[in-house]
Image (cartoon, helix red, strand yellow):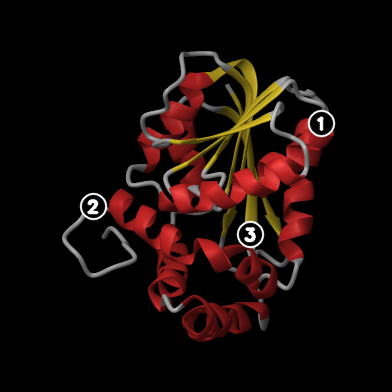
Amino acid sequence: MEVKPYQEETGKKEQIEKMFDSISARYDFLNRFLSLGIDIYWRKLMVNRLKAIKPKTILDIATGTADVAIAMRKIGPDKIVGLDLSEGMLEIGREKVSKKGLGNLIQLVKGDSEHLPYSENAFEAVTVAFGVRNFENLLKGLSEMNRVLKPGGKVVILEFSRPRIFPVKQLYDFYFRYFCPWWGRMISKDDSAYRYLYESVNAFPEGESFIEVAKQAGFREIKAERVTFGIVSLYTGVK
């Protein structure tokens, strides 16, 4: 069953775009608050997984307000492209990029992850933080990522997963099921976004199931690393 943010007849992509546009002004604050600041550590892990290959061209899909794209500058690339469906999120990202003087390094563009506007073998690395869960067609999105990667290029994907150990599993379930939607409604006035977060995490094919889809998309040497008691999983693979 496909999980979507709103009880509407429109497709998932349209709803995802609408959802992120509606919460874009409060997104960074909510992200820091609801993750207790751990999201900064998670982005550092993504950067570390790419340090060894030092990619010169990076595509950050579902870039949002560009936090991952900005963090990737530490690797020393020549070009970073951040792509997202939500113009509202991108506007905030562009402001951040401009304030940091990174306009010549980071380009933020509106686009569809399942129809990437780039040629084959265009990037040495592709990153996605908390975005593959929102794909309308997971296999198609991963296949597109594989297509634009150069042979030997690396993909790094960070996504929520479901903790398995007591009492983290129980606390996590309560936090994401009840607290996040309530707080999201209080701050962003859109509780659908944070209710969708809980529902989409539960519906997402994590771990070995995700690895199987990534293999179908053409990736090899795929590894899954459970982080922060299994709250998130870090996936890496090679074309």
Is residue 207 placed above or below 80 in the rendered structure?
below
Quadrant of the image occupied by residue 204: bottom left
Left or right placement of residue 153 versus residue 110 in this view: right
Q: How crowded is mark 1: few (under 14 residues within 10 Å), some or many (20 or more)?
A: some
Residue 60 is situated, as x and y percent measured from the top left of the image, at 59, 36
Give the mark count: 3
**Amino acid found under the numbered disc labelled 3:** Val
Q: Tag 3, which secondary structure? A: strand
Identity of the residue drawn at 40% across and 69% down: 196
Pick the quarter of the image with the N terminus. Answer: bottom left
Coordinates of residue 216 in the picture (x, y in percent)? 42, 30
In the image, residue 10 sits, relative to residue 180, either above or below, namely above
Using the numbered discs, state the Cα–Cα distance from disc 2 to disc 3 in whole angstroms: 26 Å
**Marker disc for residue 11:** 2
Q: How far apart are marks 3 and 1 (CA)?
A: 23 Å
Q: How far apart are marks 1 and 2 (CA)?
A: 37 Å
* Disc marking residue 232: 3
Report the disc number at residue 75.
1
